Amino acid sequence: MKAGSKYEGLYLYLRRSGKEELVLTFGEIEKLIGTPLAPSSYTRGWWSNRSNALQASAWMEAGYHVEKIDTEREHVTFRKVKRHYVVRLENNVVKWNDELIKGLRQHMNMTQAEFADVLGVRQQTVSDWEQGIYVPTRASSKHLMLVAERAQFEYSTKK
């Protein structure tokens, strides 16, 4: 989510909550974003989980999907997305890829800078990993495995 985006307040609130499910009223969302919702928000389609919609990117990038929408009572139920990751092992070390690294970071509800701090690397390194520009070294991969274990990040392995 780009800093200064209209829906950044909603994104930050969801990302920081860490809750499995959140129910927010339209009014609460308007307070978070600092402006009234669009008139089209009173239609079910506006709340769909489409990645090309600006408002949807706020909850989807925070790791949530809209589970239920009640336009009559003006309530939205957001549910945390549970992803299942299958990882490849090489000499008993996980081969971390861009999707897996981003998934771990989002599971931990952290920004790239916060995640980099935990790993003892630069934010740019995390960004490069998440974009697939570079892959972690064997030492970094082992460290990522430990961090994932402590964070109870679930994945299954294939050899």
Image (tube, rainbow, N blue to C red):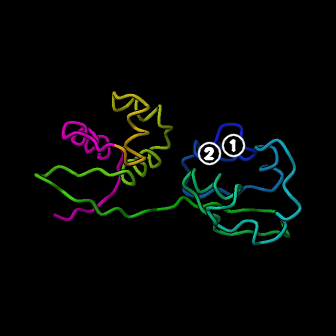
Q: Provide the residue designation for mark 2.
A: 1
The picture places residue 88, in percent across and down from the top left corner, at 22, 59
Q: Image check: 134 left or right of 45?
A: left
Left or right of 96? Residue 25 is right
Q: Is residue 102 above or below residue 41?
A: above
Task: Identify which amino acid the numbered label 1 is placed on.
Answer: Glu
Q: Residue at x 17, y 49 (%)?
A: 93
Name the residue located 32 percent from the left edge and 46 percent from the top edge. 148
1 and 2 marks in contact (CB < 8 Å): yes
Q: Quadrant of residue 40?
A: bottom right
Horizontal relation, residue 48 to residue 108: left or right: right
Q: Which residue is mark 1?
A: 8
- Residue at figure coordinates x 57%, y 52% from the top left: 61
Q: How many labels sit on residues?
A: 2
For the residue pair 80 and 88, the one nearer the viewer reads as 88
Looking at numbered disc 2 in the image, what kind of residue is underneath it? Met
Q: Position of residue 9 (x, y in %)?
A: 71, 42
Point out the image quarter for the C terminus: bottom left
Q: Looking at the figure, which quarter contains the N terminus?
A: top right
Q: Disc 1 vs disc 2: which is toward the camera?
A: 2
Q: Is residue 156 magenta?
A: yes
Q: Which residues are magenta?
A: 134-159
Q: Position of residue 29 (x, y in %)?
A: 77, 50
Q: Secondary structure at mark 2?
A: loop
Distance Cα–Cα, label 1 vs label 2: 7 Å
